[in-house]
Amino acid sequence: MTWEGWESARRRSDEGASPNVKLLLWLTLLLRGALSLCTEDIFTAYLYMLTGSNATVGFIQAMYGMARLFWSGPAGWLADRWRQDGVIKGSTVVGAVGSAALAATVLLSGPQWMLYVSMLVLGAFEGASTPTLDAMFANSVIAGASSYLYTLKFIVSNVGDACGPLIGIVLFLFMGNNWENGACTAVVLTGLALMAIPLALMCLPSDHKCLGLPSEALLNVRTPEEYQSLADAHLTSSRRQILGTLTVPILISVSELTSFFAAGMTTKFLFLFFAEQVRLSPIAASSISVASPLTMGLASIVLQRLSLRCSLSRS
């Protein structure tokens, strides 16, 4: 795929896109950057230095992940039956409470059970907000011309994941490149302070700015009558056709679930492995955390271009 082809895909995606799109891209960048500081690698190292137990670290992170999983379903149900922007604003309150509770616990060296409660609340926030924000993004781009924007969103998310450790590197340069609890505490508190910015921005996306029908039509559907005809045909389709329609979502869901299970057993403890076993300094270990998501982002650009080339060759 040439650069002209990439630009053509960008122009097709940008045409008619909702004003929500740019706001949600900025929100993704800032939210991922803040969360990567206060809930990811450095936070894992902070927990280990605080408790001295891999089991406790795993238990706290497991509670965080289970809260995300548990609340994503109810949040999706509410977003479909109520309003997406209402669910997003509600999750903002939950995120503010969780961030404040974790900041108070870290700053005041509160009891360990407060860490559990804080991470449960933050997990509920991320579980409720992330799928709802993704759904609003999907409702804000034109179906069939969204490959570029989805790739851009993935890249922005990975850049945000890299920005957190990068900020951590800067803080370690000033506070000392060593595994001291004070330095890790400062990094985590910085991330929690930065959470205020995306939480404020989460009040701005609106259902009124979503595209409606153009974002839902998977085929060449131009009018509400054509869309209704397509819906009626879908309702009368055979079980085999319905199964074929569900194949891609099922495969993606199984793939995502498998990757999350694998990440829970590897990447959550990989940073500790670099710190404790390999004896890497905080800056060196954080550099790996910066390079990994950036590499994923670059790979997504290459794969998106390949996907466009394959789709054009088949058309």
Image (cartoon, helix red, strand yellow):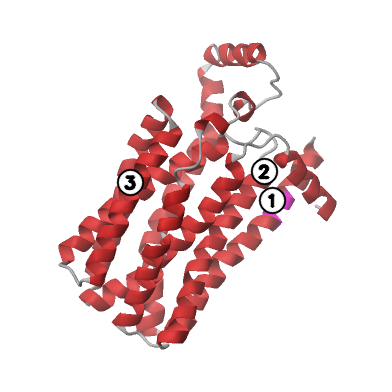
Looking at numbered disc 2 in the image, what kind of residue is underneath it? Ser
Q: Which residues are magenta?
A: 302-306
Q: Secondary structure at mark 3?
A: helix
Q: Position of residue 196 (x, y in %)?
A: 40, 57
| Residue 93 marker | 3
Mark-to-mark CA distance, 3 and 2: 32 Å
- Residue at x 25% of width, y 71% of height: 107
Q: Is residue 199 above or below residue 56?
A: above
Whether tag 3 and tag 2 are in contact, CB under 8 A, the answer is no
Q: Earlier in the sequence, mark 3 or mark 2?
A: 3
As drawn, the label of residue 147 is 2
Mark 3 vs mark 1: in front: 3
Q: For this view, does 180 lie left or right of residue 205?
A: left
Dot 1: few (<14), some (14–19), or many (≥20) neighbours within 10 Å?
some
Can residue 294 be found in the magenta stretch? Answer: no
Residue 280 in view of the camera: no
Instruction: Answer whether labels 2 and 1 touch (C-beta < 8 Å).
Output: yes
Q: Nearer the viewer, residue 189 or 116?
A: 189
Badge number at residue 92: none
Mark 3: which amino acid? Val
Please determine whether, in this image, residue 16 is positioned above or below residue 292. above
**What residue did someone put label 1 on?**
304
